[in-house]
Image: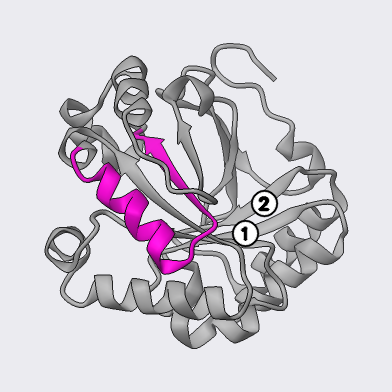
Amino acid sequence: MPELSAMERHRIAGVLAEVELLGVDISGGEPLLLRDLTTLASTIRDGGRSVVSVTTNGWHLARRAPELARCLDAIRISLDGPDPARHDAIRGAGSFARATDGIRAAVAEGIPVQIQTVLMHRTAETLQDLVDLAHGIGANGFTALQMLPIGASAALSTEMLTDEQARRVFAALRVPPGLRVRLRTRDAAGNFTVIRADGRVWRNTISALSIGGLHPLRGATDLILTSRDGTA
């Protein structure tokens, strides 16, 4: 899809700064490729109403951590495995080293760090190792996200665990002291709002199995969406 111009990105950041939102997470794609990322985050955060975070693959995090420390409340790094062999098989050679270097840099800058992974059959067996890695590298938290069969993830629907299966996997974890862990089940993922790179906005349905309300974001009222199942 075509991405917004810098001018349009800043317009939308201004819209978000004006409304009362609990939090805004800037994700991608890869948001650390945006040269104006810190300006966008600062605009939203300076509105005084939102906690602002960034979700990244960590590839450019070590380089940008010092500037991000001034404008973020937290940073989330996506890991698909607890070691180079398993993570890089999905993300590409060198990705694990770049991500973990970035995590260490963010921790050193005092940015609260959360490691997150998408929970599915192929990753369930590595969950304990990922939790241990998060603790050992200095992260504040670890989140396992139930996969949502939306967009490109629809092709992986056979990898999905039920929420009950996910809860059993999570309940078996040994949680190191001081590390906050969270499971985002599929039934807790409905009704969040997404602004796409092309400036259109949509909302997950309450079941988190599809989307509804896709339309351009022109102003604050466009954030008030009704999903296909009638929820506002």
Which residue extends farthest front?
177
- Left or right of residue 54: residue 208: left
**Is residue 225 depicted above or below 81 in this figure?**
above
Q: Earlier in the sequence, mark 1 or mark 2?
A: 2
State which quarter of the image contains the N terminus: bottom left
Residue type pointed to by label 1: Ser
Q: Which residues are magenta?
A: 125-147
- Asked whether residue 63 appears in the rendered view, the answer is yes
Along the line of sight, which residue is nearer the eye, 49 or 109? Answer: 109
Q: Between residue 216 and residue 67, name the one nearer to us.
A: 67
- Secondary structure state at the residue bearing disc 2: strand
Q: Nearer the viewer, mark 1 or mark 2?
A: 1
How many angstroms separate mark 1 from mark 2 (CA)? 6 Å
Identify the residue at image location x=77%, y=62%. Answer: 44
The amino acid pointed to by label 2 is Val
Q: Are marks 1 and 2 in contact (CB under 8 Å)?
A: yes
Label 1's element?
strand
Q: In which quarter of the view is residue 151 placed?
A: top left
Side of 21 where 189 appears, left or right: left
Asked if residue 142 is among those painted magenta in the image, a careful observer would answer: yes
What residue is shown with label 2? 24
The image's mark for residue 53 is 1
Q: How far across and how far down the image is residue 123, in percent? A: 21, 42
Q: Vertically, is 21 above or below 135? A: above
Residue 209: x %, y % from top left = 40, 23
Residue at 87% x, 60% y: name it: 47
User: Which residue is located at x 72 percent, y 78 percent?
Assistant: 70
Tell me residue 198's x, y (percent). 52, 56
